[in-house]
Amino acid sequence: MSEHPLAASNDPANDPDGPPARPSRRGFLQGAAAAASAFALPHESAGARTSAPAPARPAALAPARPVSLNINGKPYALSLEPRVTLLDALREVLGLTGTKKGCDRGQCGACTVLMNGRRINSCLTLAIMHEGETITTVEGLAHAQDGVVDRAALHPVQAAFLEHDAFQCGYCTPGQICSAVAVLEEARRGMPSTVTSPAALGNDGPVSLTEDEIRERMSGNLCRCGAYPNIVAAIRVVAAKSGNAA
């Protein structure tokens, strides 16, 4: 017996007026992937049309030039690129690593050395600027015998720092010591600071190193461990031995 033609309308897939067929999971995922690809294509093509900026080329190094330096009483004939700082010349070229690189921008004082007896931040000056000048680092303060330094040969400031535990981690200590040596000399020569009493400004004699004087004059040397009381005590002891402490 043949099936009635209208019986086929009971199947929703064969009924043009019935509800739409439910999409399969595979079909949905394929359609979503195709749509995502279509949206991505314009962006990729735009990116392909826009050329990426060329990376900045490093500045060409200037030719090295001969530099003669007098460091800790010894002459050194070097060949340095003109932009090499004195700090890098000391540490990287000569191996004098007692001078420390802290902030590398003149704010912490760890790189302090003595230039003709006056303290400077070696990270802020170029090596080629100091030909013919006398440079003293922390290694040059003590008197070494055959490369060996015993306690008796230490500079008085170095010995006082040991005696008073004026350091903790020790990283800032070379700069602190070099700066303290300069402070003692500045006070001996009568150079005032911002806290020097007006009564002492007209005197030709040395400035008495009170605690306030020492703290002010050493304020350019930072100690992140906080050993400031012992640093001040060490400097006062040396000043007292030279008759220059209040």
Image (cartoon, rainbow, N blue to C red):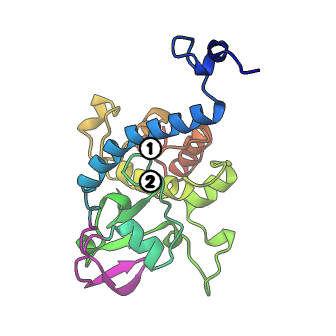
**Segment tinted magenta in the rendering:** 57-83
- Please, is residue 82 above or below residue 113 in the view? below
Kind of residue at badge 1 = Met
> Residue 230, percent across and down?
62, 42
Q: Position of residue 15 (x, y in %)?
A: 57, 16
Dots 2 and 1: beta carbons under 8 Å?
Answer: yes
Q: Residues within 10 Å of mark 2 (few under 14, many from 20)?
A: many
> Which residue is nearer to you in this view: 202 or 78?
78
Q: Which residue is mark 1?
A: 218
Q: Earlier in the sequence, mark 2 or mark 1?
A: 2
State the residue at coordinates (29%, 54%).
48
Q: Secondary structure at mark 2?
A: helix
Task: Look at the image and tell me whether residue 35 can be seen.
Answer: yes
Q: Which residue is mark 2?
A: 179
Write down the quadrant of residue 203 in the picture.
Answer: top left
Q: Is residue 37 left or right of residue 234?
A: left
